[in-house]
Amino acid sequence: MPWKSCVRRSAASGPCGTSAWPTTSSSICLQVLCFLLISCFEVHSHAEVGDLRELQTLDISTNRLMTLPERLHMCLSLQYLTADRNHLWYVPRHLCQLPSLNELSMAGNRLAFLPLDLGRSRELQYVYVDNNIHLKGLPSYLYNKVIGCSGCGSPIQVSEVKLLSFSSGQLTVFLPAEVKSIGTETDHVLPLQELAMRTLYNTYYRFLKDLNFLTPISLPKSLLELLHCPLGHCHRCSQPMFTIVYPKLFPLRETPMAGLHQGRTTVSFVAYCCSTQCLQTFDLLS
């Protein structure tokens, strides 16, 4: 159900040019706030959004945002997130862990890639990323979802976007910045760091909600964060991945969904796999 038809128990909003963000003295209100609209003025970031534990609907469209609020993934009740017409260039992978998120709209931004796990949650059913001209790949998890991607995948020179890219034939997609290397069907041996991270994750999985069992001296902060929130999970077997992916492209125009989009997009679905075996056996339509 689209957010516009949801029930709003309480709301905070402001007219163009004024900020409606609650002050620290409104902490009680923050605990029960369910709907928040902030738009039409420049907002750089609001770390406090992570305190809105009851927030169900957030609309931060038209704010010239370069990034989403840092602790947005802590809004565990969030169901509808709209961030259209900003300057966003990526979707934090932590958002894929939101247990209640049902609809995500990020149309009219500067996205060039999406998190590997976007759509893995069964709860997420609606994803709208229309008019992100650099966006050429959609995670294969989105294949059975309601998606909007008109105006995506416009022809550009790969050199115009300084990101790691993967090409198959005449198709090219950009990959998340966290991806360190791309595996192929001939790469049967994983990099040592990837093997170590997978082993560590599988060994200590039950402790990962409290990473204090590993001191900062044990691993760099960036690797600790990856343990807590992997780069993604294999679209074939759900194995967590940390530094390397094995991508496989399925042009949308060659799928049964082509008729729904009628040539308005040139994107491909991307299956991110953990090994050559999963890469070779993955089938989008099965």
Image: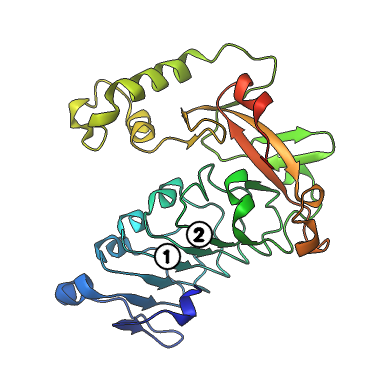
Residue 29, x across and y down, in percent: 19, 77
Q: Position of residue 172 (x, y in %)?
A: 75, 40
Query: Could you tell me which residue is drawn at 38 percent across and 63 percent down?
Result: 45
**Number of marks drawn:** 2
Q: Residues within 10 Å of mark 1 (few under 14, many from 20)?
A: few
Left or right, 96 with reference to 56: right
Quarter holding the C terminus is top right
Question: In terms of image quadrants, where is residue 205?
Answer: top left
Q: Earlier in the sequence, mark 2 or mark 1?
A: 1
On screen, residue 245 versus residue 137, left or right, reads: left
Which of the 4 image quadrants contains residue 161?
Answer: top right
Q: Is residue 83 above or below residue 119?
A: below
SS assignment at label 2: loop
Verify CB contact (< 8 Å) between mark 2 and mark 1: yes
The outermost residue toward the bottom is 15
Q: In the rendered structure, find residue 224 and report the number of the disc placed on it.
A: none
Residue lying at 57% horizontally and 46% vertically, measured from the top left: 141
Q: Nearer the viewer, residue 49 or 161?
A: 49
Given residues 18 and 93, the one toward you in this image is 93
Residue 188: image quadrant is top right
Instruction: Please state which amino acid type lies under the numbered disc 1.
Output: His
Residue identified by numbered label 2: 66
Q: Work out whether 6 lies above or below 175.
A: below
Q: Nearer the viewer, residue 199 or 220?
A: 199
Crowding near the residue tagged with mark 2, few <14, some 14–19, many ≥20 C-alpha atoms within 10 Å = some
Residue receiving disc 1? 44
Question: Can residue 59 be seen in this snapshot?
Answer: yes
Identify the amino acid type marked 2. Met
Taking 106 as reference, is 220 above or below it? above
Coordinates of residue 181 in the picture (x, y in percent): 59, 25
In percent of width and height, residue 73 lies at 35, 54
